[in-house]
Image: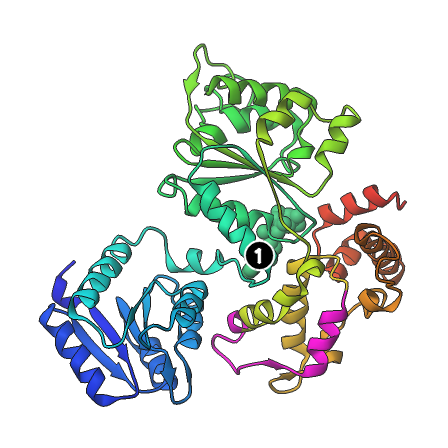
Amino acid sequence: MNKTSQQVLVIDDEPDIRELLSMTLARMNLATKEAGTVKQAKNLLKDEKFDLCLTDMRLPDGSGIDLVRFAQEKYPHLPIAVITAFGNVESAVEALKAGAFDFVSKPVQLDDLRNLVAAALKASSPVHDDKERRHRHMLIGDSPAMQGIRGKIGKLARSQAPIYISGDSGTGKELVARLIHDQSARSQAPFVPVNCGAIPSELMESEFFGHKKGSFTGATADKPGLFQAADGGTLFLDEVAELPMHMQVKLLRAIQEKAVRPVGAQTEVLINVRFLSATQRNLSGLVAKGNFREDLYYRINVIELRVPSLRERVGDIPLLVEHFLRRLDEHGPHYVLTQDAYAALNAYAFPGNVRELENILQRAVALCDGESIAADDLGLTHANRGAAQSSFVPGGEPLEGYLARIEKQALIDALNHTRQNKTAAAKLLGMSFRSLRYKLDKFGID
Ligand SMILES: Nc1ncnc2c1ncn2[C@@H]1O[C@H](COP(=O)(O)OP(=O)(O)OP(=O)(O)O)[C@@H](O)[C@H]1O
Ligand SMILES: [Mg+2]
C-alpha cells in the first residue's frame, strides 16, 4: 500500500490543536481530514475512507467515547485512538473498554503520537477478514458477565485447548466460538461450523472425514471432509449432543490420533484442527444417562465456557438494542425505543435470549409508526411479559428453577397460541425449530 494514500481523521473542537496534529501527521506522510464535532466526524467517516481516527475526549456535542462506540459498530476495522486530559486514567480506561485502540494524553508528545500511529497502521494494514464479518462478530454487552466472557475469550484464543461452550438457546454460543477463532493464531485458516444435528447419520462419516471416488454409490469424485476443510483452523461442533453413538467413537479417535481416514481410503491424513463445541442440552446429564460417551465428553470439555442467559444480564439490553437497531436502520430512519418499551424489555423473560431480542426488534421496526418504538410495538408474548417480576420472591426459590418455570410456561402458551404448530411456535418465541424441540423434550412437554 502506498504510504501517502493513508488518511487520518483528526477530531478536536480547538482549531489550533487540530492544525498542530494535522501538521505533525503530514510530516509522517499522512493525509488528514479535520472535524470539530461528533456530528462532523460521523459524516466524514461515512463519506471517506480512513486508516486511523484520533479524537479528543470532550467534544461540544458528545464525547470521544461515543465516537469510539460508533466507529466500533460501523467501521470495526478502523483503529480509533483518544486524546485524554493529562492524568485522566479513568477516561482512558473507559475508552479502551469501549474499543479504542489506544490513547495519548495531552499535551500530545510527538514521540507518543508517532508510536501510536505506527502501531495503529501496522495493526490495520493487512485486512484479514472482510468488514461485514467483523461487524457481525461483535460481542455486545457491558455487564460483568459479558466482560468476564470477553476476557476469557482473549485468553482462550491463545490456547489450543478444546472448549465446550454451554448456554441456552440464542445466548450467543456460536458468536463466542467465532470470536475465539478470530482472535486466535488460527484466524487466517477457516472456521468451520458443523451442525451435528443436521447431517443425516449415514452421511456423517463421509461429511466429517471425506471419501475416495467410488467408495460408495454416488461418490463420483474424491471429496475432502470437514476436518480437512478446517485444517489449520477451527472445527466448531455445534449441537454436539446430537452426534450418533457410532460417530462419537470415530470422532474421539480422530481427535486423539490427530488423523482421519477418508471413507474408502487406505491411509490416514494428518489434520491440525482446534475443537470448539456447543450445545444447549445438558451434556453431563446425557453422559450420566449413557447417551453421550464419557471419554468424548472429557476430550471436548477440557474447558467449559458458559454463556449466561439474557435474563441474567438485563443490563446488557440497552446496548444490544442500540446495536441491533443500528443494523436495522443503516439506510433509513433512526429508531428509538420509548422508556415504556425499555421497561417492558427489562421485565421480559426472553426464553429465546439475544436471538429473540433481535427478532423482536426486527418485527417492531416493521410495525411501528414513525421512528419511535413503543412497548406495544414489541409484541411480547403474554406469558413472558412482566414474568420476571410478577411472582418473584427474592430468596424464595433458586433462580434456575424460577426461570425454568417461566420458560416452560412460555412454550406452552406459544403452542396453544399457534394450535400446536411447532414451526409457528418456534417463530413466535424467536427460536429455531430445533431449539424448540429440545426445550419441549427437556421440559417433558408433549
Ligand atoms: N452479545 C451479543 N452481541 C451481539 N450479538 C449477539 C450477542 N449474542 C448473540 N448475538 C446474536 O444473536 C444471534 C444468536 O446467537 P448465536 O447463534 O451465537 O446463539 P446460540 O447460542 O448459538 O443459539 P442456539 O443455541 O439457538 O444455536 C446471532 O445473530 C448473534 O449474532
Ligand atoms: Mg448455535
Secondary element under disc 1, as helix, strand or loop, is helix
Q: Quadrant of the N terminus?
A: bottom left
Residue at point 68% right, 78% down? 367
Instruction: Tell me where the magenta segment starts and ends, as one range.
Output: 326-348
Residue 310 visible from this viewpoint:
yes
Front-most of residues 258 and 53: 53
Residue 222 appears in which quarter of the rendering? top left
Residue 411 appears in which quarter of the rendering? bottom right
- Is residue 344 rendered magenta in the image? yes
Residue 25 appears in which quarter of the rendering? bottom left
Residue at point 69% right, 43% down? 280
Give the percent coordinates (x, y) of residue 327.
Answer: 51, 69
Judge whether 189 appears above or below 1 on screen: above
Give the percent coordinates (x, y) of residue 106.
Answer: 27, 76
Give the percent coordinates (x, y) of residue 2.
Answer: 13, 61
- Is residue 416 rendered magenta in the image? no
Judge whether 123 appears above or below 95 on screen: above
How are the residues colored? rainbow
Image check: 10 left or right of 248? left
Front-most of residues 341 and 114: 114
Q: Is mark 1 within 8 Å of ligand 1?
A: yes
Residue at point 60% right, 71% down? 321
* Amino acid beneath label 1: Met
Mark 1, residue position: 146
Image check: 202 left or right of 35? right
